[in-house]
Image: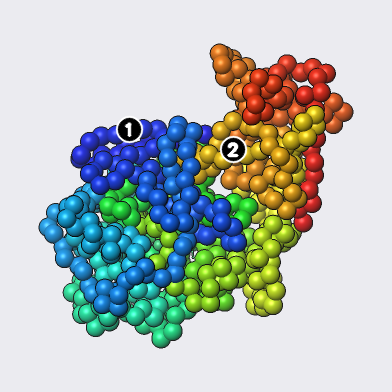
Amino acid sequence: MKFINTNLDFKCGRWRNRRILILCGSLVTIVLLWTNFYSSIGSSTSDNSWGVNLKLAAGQREWQDSRGMRVVVGHYIGPSVDNATKEMMNKNYFAPEQNAGHDGRPVEIAPKELYLMRRLFPLHRFNLLASDRIPLNRTLPDVRRPACKTKVYVDEESLPEVSVIIVFHNEAWSTLLRTVWSVVLRSPHSLLSEIILVDDASDRDFLKEELDKAVLELPVPVHIIRLKTRIGLVGARLAGARVAVAPVLLFLDAHCEAAPGFLVPLLAHLRVSPRSAVCPIIDIISDETLAYIKSFELHWGAFNWNLHFRWYTLGNSELQKRKKDMTAPFPSPAMAGGLFAIMKEYFFEVGAYDEKMKIWGGENLELSFRLWQCGGKVEIVPCSHIGHIFRKSSPYSFPGGMREILSTNLARMALVWMDSWVDFFFKFNPEVGLQARGQNITDRLILREKLNCKNFEWYLKNVWPQHFFPQDGRFFGRIKHSESEKCMKKPVSKGVLGQPMGSATLGICLKDEDLNGMFVMTEEGIIMTDESICLDAPQKNEFEGEKKGAVKVMGCSGYPRQKWSYNEKTYQLQHASTGQCLDISTSSDTSSIVLRTCSTEKSQHWILDSVAWK
Ligand code: UD2
Ligand code: MN
């Protein structure tokens, strides 16, 4: 797996590390772990935050990455605001200090204020005290690649204008208004028609008249739409989109900060690619310190077997394509969901959103599948950067129950777009399958028909050929070591991307309904499993010393060292680039998997034990 050098410089020291970003500053050390961000439905083993820190909170799990760095991944514990009084919730704590958070730097909280900081944190599940110190117009580092800074866009003045749509439910004053100000301060005003704020039935006092007054100070038209009852982000975004006057819609979460030069590259790309949802690189605003942190650029968005959104490193073939022009927009199988621009006319033509998706979740994959399958695209524009506060848990309520809502949204999306793979999804996530019963998806199926959309098999094959889902012609099931009757097992420790990584080992064979025990073998001989991890062994010339013959499980790269072939007669699994066979190590008690010269030894017998996936 390849990691990029992110060259962070926050003035308090320079750190270059290929695998982790360590942010200096007195308060925290942050290990960035790009993972998914929403709850694993029905599973307590979910790992689902975007940004990660080192403090363990209730309901969080912890792993060591392969270098022993501790990483913590939270999950959606919401709802509720722990012990917050009504008075606390309704108070606006905004009290900016001139240079706080200047240039995207972390905010330091004095020891005597730590108590207050901790009291306020649960209100929004980010450091409200820090956010409320930072002026609305703080400066940010220009994190773009040098080639992006000098890139010339033809006919910039004649780009289509944009309506920016920001939906919120009980957002903090400082983050909401900093989102708005960052857009205003960093956009050419000739291209910015309006900003539409859609209040999804917030109940905080300061989001009423006080907000009405505050937006009057802005030098561009800002409209506020107030929804009477809470409907969730899909309904709220639609309410904004319907009244937008500009040809382009730009959706943003309510806790973003647009970075220098973010707008023109998005609009310029829509001009050449009008049937596309174009996404910026989403940088990280730390939930602990509010520092602005440049994020990885060599990733694209997709999802795992449980349909949780994930960032994965680009494989070798995509990297080669991107290397030709690192400023060029590139396709992505899926979008994160919150930050994208799209032509208004096309957005409605392609079916906008599924209005029956309530509150939060699932709409990002639904839109991504629909775009790709119905002749459109999802693309990432690497010259556009916008920061977002990634939280480890959701601060607001999910009326009707979080699991029910998420399961319903995901079930609707899968039923409409995923064809045979809906069976795979429901089979291994029965609680989502349960929620699928009684869903009326007729409207969406008519839309799919009307738009003459392609099927999910086409999507997987063409948009995401590196996918690790089962499909016809691929083996799916357990890989069993015949002599010991044990099965190949995924390592529990996680690497920087949140993907399991480490030595390949054997463990007890898991049941048919347990996805953790399943592997896929492709026709090309790649042995892979959930989270885009592959069975990997070094090339011959790398075989030296103690690591001799070590077989690992790590991020799929597309390199020959991850190719294997299975001989049905001899039961051997042979490594393509070394010609050696998969065996187990007798010296260790953990039954690790190794490569050895192929022989007639029974310890080299493996059974590909198929499990039905649909
Ligand atoms: C991500 C997306 C988010 C959305 C979500 C899946 C990014 C950066 N964020 O989660 O946009 O696609 O995945 O649904 O890609 N909100 C309402 N009403 C509600 C709930 C939320 O208006 O009932 C607002 C909320 O105030 C925020 C936006 O919707 O401005 C997104 O919610 P989030 O920030 O909790 O979602 P996030 O970033 O975890
Ligand atoms: Mn968000």
Q: Residue at x 32, y 71 (%)?
A: 84
- Of residues 2 and 15, the one nearer the viewer is 15
Left or right, 6 with reference to 597: left
* Residue 293 seen anywhere in this rendered image of the structure: yes
Task: Name the outermost residue toward the right.
Answer: 569
Which quadrant holds residue 44? Answer: bottom right
Disc 1 residue type (three-letter): Arg
Residue 269 is left or right of residue 218, and the answer is right
Q: Measured from the top left, where is residue 421 in percent x and y?
A: 71, 57
Rendered image: mark on residue 16: 1
Q: Along the horizontal axis of the image, is 226 left or right of 315? A: left
User: What residue is at 28 percent from the left and 54 percent from the top?
Assistant: 290
Q: Is residue 15 above or below residue 353?
A: above
Q: Residue at x 22, y 72 (%)?
A: 92
Dot 1 or dot 2, earlier in sequence: 1
* Quadrant in which residue 561 is drawn: top right
Residue carrying label 2: 491
Q: Badges 1 and 2: C-beta atoms under 8 Å apart?
A: no
Say what secondary structure mark 2 lies in.
Answer: loop
Q: Residue furthest left?
A: 98
Disc 2 residue crowd, few under 14, some 14–19, many 20+, Cα 10 Å? some
Answer few, some or many: residues within 10 Å of disc 1's Cα (few below 14, many 20 plus, some between 14 and 19).
few
Q: Residue at x 62, y 46 (%)?
A: 530
Vertical arrangement, residue 252 with respect to residue 264, above or below: below
Vertical order, 606 against 271 (above or below): above
- Ligand 2 image position (quadrant): bottom left
